[in-house]
Image (cartoon, rainbow, N blue to C red):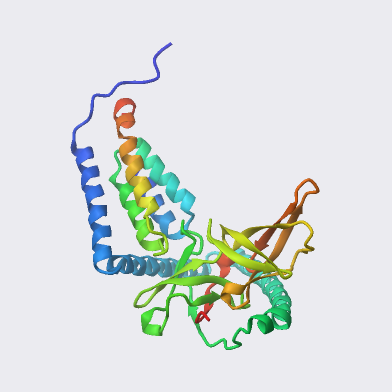
Amino acid sequence: MATQFTFNAPRGRSGRRRLIYATLLVIVVFALDALTGGNIRELTQRAGSSLWKLSENVRRGVFDSGYFRTHRSLAEKNAQLRAEIERGNENAASYIALKQENEILRSLLQVSQDENGITVPVVSSMSASPYGTFLIGAGRANGMVQGSLVLTPGGFVVGVVSEVREKTSLVREVFAGAAQADVLINGAAAPAEGRGGGNARVAMPRGIAILEGDPVIAPLFGGRPVGVVGKVDSDSSNADQTVYVVLPINISSLRFVHIVPAN
Amino acid sequence: MRTLIALLGFVSALFLHPLLTALCIFFLAFRYASWEAILLGCMTDLIWQPSSISFPYFTLAAILIVWVLGPLRSQFLR
């Protein structure tokens, strides 16, 4: 049988040299970024958000040209109906959450009712980040402060402002992969383990009655809702039940978010 | 092919899914002595890494994988 492998004499050193240069360049870039207080990061993020905005404009331009009108009108109608359903779901979940919040937690935790804030656009993809982050189009110039809460139009906390630049800010999702947040479900507290995309998993004692649609509240965020119960997995051989938490809105469809200062 | 994968990686880092970016980095590093893989990891971290995470994992992983796979690449792949 002919051998499957071949032996190659080491090729010229140019490839290796390029690797060394690239490695050194990256080290220099991170060192400069640290020395300049994140200026290189800011430039990269601004370029990234500009490209994202450009791609959105191109996408709209192509689909608004009329070439894909028939297909597009159906797709648009479909998307519109889906969005309406999602809005309805979110409003219903939001109502339950707010009702429970008002009745129990706000009085107990004495949380301020003040919801002063600003609405800002999302200026990056919501799914491309390996760290569960996204960019919003407001920064220091707009009075953004690190630690501010990022809410969906329905009032669910979706993230926390992690870094503030001049014109953009980086938001870390509450339920980014491997992130942990303490939550309350039906008055019972437990840590939620983030799974990305607005989803989380919570292990709770099986004795606690939890139903799909129950609001999930985060005391750390002023008793605001962070999601609803999407599914409950309960097994008689296990003392715990697994609660899957979801956002009642598709996180990728968010175009605007509301920013409120953290309490 | 190399340019296409690198381009896909850069597009993925901005618009698509991080798993696809990671796959592009791995494939580039596995098949070529790819400086693009290192820059791709660096760009991903510069755009998305929050300050609460202290290590630029994508950059470190890209550098590691490019250098670790180097001997294997030079021995067995043309």
Q: Is residue B71 visible?
A: yes
Name which quarter of the figure residue A251 lies in.
bottom right
Q: Residue furthest top?
A: A1
In the rendering, at what x and y percent does residue B8 appear? 41, 50
Q: Position of residue A104 (x, y in %)?
A: 72, 80
Q: Which image quarter is the N terminus of chain A in?
A: top left
The residue positioned 57% from the left and 64% from the top of the image is A181
Along the line of sight, which residue is nearer the eye, A39 or A5? A39
In the depicted structure, whether residue B3 falls above or below residue B49: above
Q: Residue at x 30, y 39 (%)?
A: B67
Q: Is residue B3 visible?
A: no
Whole-percent x and y of residue A11?
A: 22, 30
In this view, the residue in front, A260 or A15, is A260
Q: Position of residue A205 (x, y in %)?
A: 74, 57
Asked whether, in this view, residue A69 is left or right of residue B49, the answer is right
Residue at left 48%, top 49%? Answer: B19
How many labels sit on residues?
0
* A56 vs A45, nearest the viewer: A45
Using the rendered view, name the quadrant where residue A145 is placed.
bottom left
Vertically, is A76 above or below A177?
below
